[in-house]
Amino acid sequence: MSTTDDAGANTTGANTTGGTGETRRLRRIEPAALAGVITHDITLFRRYWPSTSFSAVVEPTIYLLAFGWGFGSLVSVVAGYRYVEFLGTGVVASAVLFASAFASMFQTFVRRTYQKLYGAVLAAPVDVPEIVLGEALWIAAKAGVYGCAPLLVAIAFGLDPTPGMLVIPFVGFLTGLGFGLFGIWTSALVPSIDSFSYIISGVLTPLFLVAGTFFPVSELPGWARALSWANPLYHCVELVRDAAFGFAPLADLGHLGALGVFAGIMWLLAVRSMRRRLID
Amino acid sequence: MVHGMPLPRTETLATTTGPGDQPGESAISMRNVVKRYGEVAAVDGLDLDVPVGVCLGLLGPNGAGKSTTMRMLTAQSIADTGRINVLGYDVPRASKQARAAMGVVPQEDNLDTELTARQNLAVFARLYRVPARRRRAAVEQALALAQLNDRADTVTEKLSGGMRRRLLIARALVHRPRLVLLDEPTVGLDPQVRQELWSLIAGLGADGVTVLMSTHYIEEAERLAQDVAIMSRGRVIARDTPARLIDAHAGRTAAEYYGPPPKLAEIAARAEAAGFTTRRTGPSVSVLRAENMPAELDDRLGIGVRRAATLEDVFVALTGERVE
């Protein structure tokens, strides 16, 4: 973490300069600041929800249908599951990825550079970590909801609903939090909006393809299987499948922990890179 | 004068009485502030005080360090050395607290163009912690102030440049701040819009709000500011009321001479040889402190037009730079 004494530095004890008792102390992360940032997102969402929802629902559905019909006719059982079950649960992770990392990268970049909106927000009593967390929480919430879309489609195609599936929005939220923060972090790294191609093709697409969504990771060579442990989407896929078909407590705690660590690391990187871009 | 008269304070976080709120105290105090970007010192040993209730014009050519100064006051730019205190709070350490009680109008339009005027204000009313029960009224008041009531539900993208500027100002006032920073508030606007904004800004002063306004339009400073600080190369080189600055640095009158360029050059050379400061004023050359001109020099320079000295004369005399 940055140790520079900047606006994001600890503001507790702000009153030591002689504020009167009436002036409320402001904490480092204020719920009111987060609410303000999220209000902005919700206001925009109320305008754009049809198009956002369309792509969030239709894109994974297409994967589901194309692979389901295409592959499903060739292979009926994968890793012990019917293919529609295997795929329907796997595509949840893709939907989460689309709703989080992609949205977050472009939206954060546009707001910071073209609109210079964060400059205005930072002039209010809001600090960089609050902007980052507010944006990430909203993105995570959307990812949690949109992540369920392919599941519902799969249920329509014959996936049996189970009570464990109620956990899936939370898995989507946690995964979306990590990838939302990943998007914020990378949006502050790239010199221009075109540079996102490198991140999409070089990082996100490989993660997306070898997460165990379309085929089991166990089919990969040993080194690639080992690498998949470093792929947050793999942990999301595994958790979702276990939520749908039966938990494996120890392994699932490991998956949960991995997603938590991923989000934690992304939080540190996102705050640091955004601070570098916004505060000079 | 209504300086220092407290506004009917509402119970927002911003408007609870706090330090730096009494007339006579400093709303802003900067001591020996330095900010470097690589080798370049954008702000270089700046000392600046803005007393509560005063509108201070920060005047300087482009690159004098005005915008960096503004950014440091909201901790979006962190000083390398020096002390900054805003409304009694140390900046950047307690900047968040200070920002709750101040409004900022940036030079560049940073409204969310996808939101309506009202939505822009509503979002910032939250960010500025206007309590929920007051939020609607605060937004409506800000809309009225910006005279945007009939355009309240228009997407900001579709508003004219002048309307957007007014909205930008209204956004900075939605929480009734005690201090307002205006960074080049009318840059790039046509004269009519500028007049409208001037009355808006003048209204702030009348409400007892402390204003720090950077500008490179001399007329803007002359009209709105009780006090003017002239910045050059990252520090304040002169600070007083416009009248006293003019008196001290440009005298009472200037003589303006018109003619072809060689003739003007000759006049300037003669006046300067006699120890007078001259400057080009568009198609003419002006000789400052014309009231001290000996009759003999006056005759030799030919027929000039006497006019009252202006802040612009001061500015050019002090900074050696041309102004708009």
Image: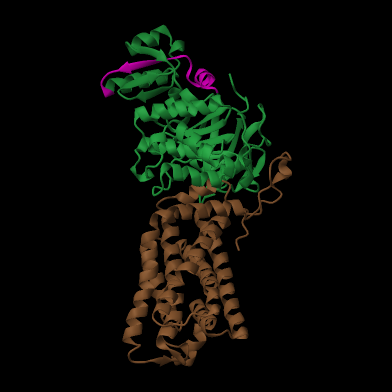
Chain letter, green in picture: B
The answer to whether residue A250 is above or below residue A12 is below
Q: Quadrant of residue A254?
A: bottom right
Quarter of the image that includes the N terminus of chain B: top right
Quarter of the image that includes the C terminus of chain B: top left
Q: Residue at x 51, y 43 (%)?
A: B68
Instruction: Looking at the picture, tell me which residue is in the foreground, A148 or A29.
Output: A148
The residue at the far top in this view is B295
Instruction: Looking at the picture, tell me which residue is in the foreground, B190 or B122.
Output: B122
Q: Colour of chain A?
A: brown
Asked whether residue B65 is in view, the answer is no
Instruction: State the extent of the magenta-drawn residues as a range.
Output: B241-261
Asked whether residue B2 is in view, the answer is yes
Q: Position of residue B36 (x, y in %)?
A: 54, 48
Q: Position of residue A167 (x, y in %)?
A: 55, 74
Q: Is residue B64 magenta?
A: no
